[in-house]
Amino acid sequence: MQRDLYQQMVLIRAYEEAILREYHADKKPVFDIGAGLIPGEMHLSAGQEPVAAGVCAHSIPGDSVTATHRPHHFALAHGVDMKAMTAEIFGRVDGLGRGRGGHMHLFDPMTKFSCSGIVGEGLPVAVGQALAFSRRGTGNVAIAVAGEGAANQGAFHEALNLAAVWKLPVLFVIEDND
Ligand SMILES: Cc1ncc(C[n+]2csc(CCOP(=O)(O)OP(=O)(O)O)c2C)c(N)n1
């Protein structure tokens, strides 16, 4: 178990370092956000890999994850196909969303993984998934990930309130990376 967790963390860190290299490759000498193989913004999770590895080690098939604009570590730990998500990050047609979503919008119905560039967006989505799990009696849990920056969003409070009132199987994970 400990070795699996460590392996997972090393894989995530190596992945993020590789994406960082590719992201910066053609944006020099003066940083140009629109240039290169991965144009646009990039939010990496190096340093946060223990959270994803630790949480996902306890999940079972059928559990869902709604992640944030910083999603790669949870996508990998949850079992999203690395090739398909990497193709999406590079904007290729063989990506999870045919290359139209990019790195903040990875959607994978197969593993029930999603993420969003809208801060706090995944929390009410997870409550809806948990309601479905509860009604169907699947025994699954919806894992809702958010940064501490999401805690002042209305959606954050609405999601926590509804999940508690309806006693839904949601695990709220707040990643406080300062
Ligand atoms: C609803 C909404 N408001 C503002 C933004 C702009 N924005 C993007 S990332 C970010 C900070 C998020 O902080 P946190 O959730 O703690 O995540 P971190 O980037 O620190 O991992 C903000 C305000 C946004 N994407 N969505």
Image (cartoon, rainbow, N blue to C red):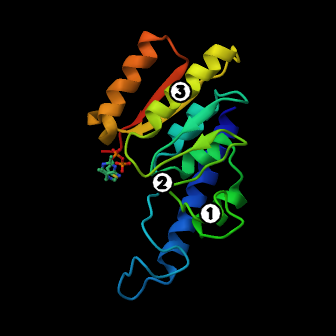
* For marks 2 and 3 on the same chain, the one whose residue lies earlier in the sequence: 2
Q: Marks 2 and 3: which is nearer the front?
A: 3
The location of residue 166, given as percent across then percent down, is: 47, 11
The residue under label 3 is which amino acid type? Gly
* 102 horizontally vs 118: left or right: right
* For marks 2 and 1 on the same chain, the one whose residue lies earlier in the sequence: 2
Residue tagged 1? 88
Residue tagged 3? 128
Q: CA distance from mark 2 to mark 1?
A: 19 Å
**Identity of the residue drawn at 69% across and 44% down:** 79
Pick the quarter of the image with the C terminus. Answer: top left
For the residue pair 170 and 162, the one nearer the viewer reads as 162
Q: Quadrant of residue 111?
A: top right
Q: Secondary structure at mark 3?
A: helix
Residue tagged 2? 46
**Identity of the residue drawn at 45% across and 31% down:** 124
